[in-house]
Amino acid sequence: MDFFHLLILALIQGITEFLPISSSGHLILLPALTGSEDQGQFIDVAVHIGTLGAVILYFWTDVKTGLFGLPRLLQGKIDTPGSKLAFLLIIATIPAILFGLVLSVTGLDDMFRSMKVIGWTMLIFGIVLWWMDTKSPETKTEGDWTKREAIILGLWQCLALIPGTSRSGITITGARALGYTRADGAKIAMLMSIPIILASGVLLVLEVIGEADTAAMRDGAIAAGLSFVSAFAALILMMRLLKSISFTPYVIYRVVLGAILLWIAYT
């Protein structure tokens, strides 16, 4: 794959990953709308790994707290901020892993990679985000996160496996429905992305290594590096904007894009 194509993919991923507008949906739409070669799921995951590095760097203080809490958690003790955070992130990740296995075994994951599906999910979940963001109170912060709410957000995150839904968007929607502030809901959503992206990335990397596909490894490394840079910049911008604006501009974008995609798909 040529460098320019990888650059475009990385920019799309970096800019859209942390905005509630579905990075995976945009990655699937690129070849569908331009007629270019589909980059495949490995490159999709590679650029997600790049954004994973960005979110780890941005939230390093929280990530470090969770990592230091793992030994305590492995001892069966959840009595420190770090062990609690690690426990909640693990609990929130399990539903998506199980649902992902179901989609993979049944072949539905490939079936969902269509313009019609992305159009509908863009439209429907954009409206759901708007409803939850405008109707829900802002009474909770990240420190209020509980086991029950981790399970609930984990179930919300399952929907993100359907292209066009947006992983960050759907978990932010769930967090707002639970009463979390925009900034804290977004922070929880970003931290939840770490284990799920890491799990899917490791599986695909091992698959490529087993096939000794050096070309794919090279392209994946380039794409991951480029997406890391663009994602880190986008993350800084989004977290700053959340202090002054709602999610309505993103909702408008989702609804307009979804309507256009459905018009194209059905005509």
Image (spheres, rainbow, N blue to C red):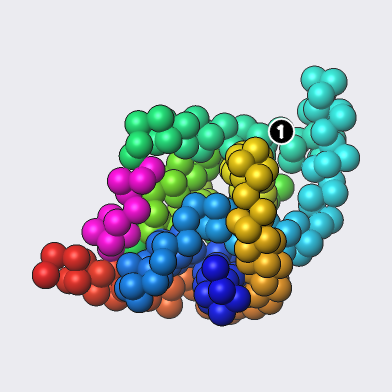
Q: Nearer the viewer, residue 155 or 49?
A: 49
Give the residue displayed 78% in from the left and 62% down from the top. 57
Query: What is the x, y in percent for residue 60?
Result: 81, 57
Asked if the magenta segment contains residue 173, the reply would be no
Left or right position of 262 against 106: left
Query: What is the x, y in percent for residue 74?
Result: 81, 24
Above or below for 211 versus 30: above
Above or below for 64 versus 57: above
Name the residue type under label 1.
Phe
User: What quarter of the picture does the C terminus occupy?
Assistant: bottom left
Task: Report the residue marked by disc 1.
Answer: 87
Question: Total of numbered circles in the picture?
Answer: 1
Asked if the magenta segment contains residue 118, the reply would be yes
Query: What is the x, y in percent for residue 136?
Result: 45, 57
Left or right position of 241 against 264: right
The region drawn magenta spans 109-119
Give the residue displayed 43% in from the left and 35% down from the top. 104
Left or right position of 235 against 265: right
Query: What is the x, y in percent for residue 167?
Result: 50, 54
Left or right position of 35 against 80: left
Local SS, label 1:
helix
Quadrant of residue 252 within the rendered picture: bottom left
Seen as rendered, the residue at the extreme left is 267
Q: Nearer the viewer, residue 211 or 106?
A: 211
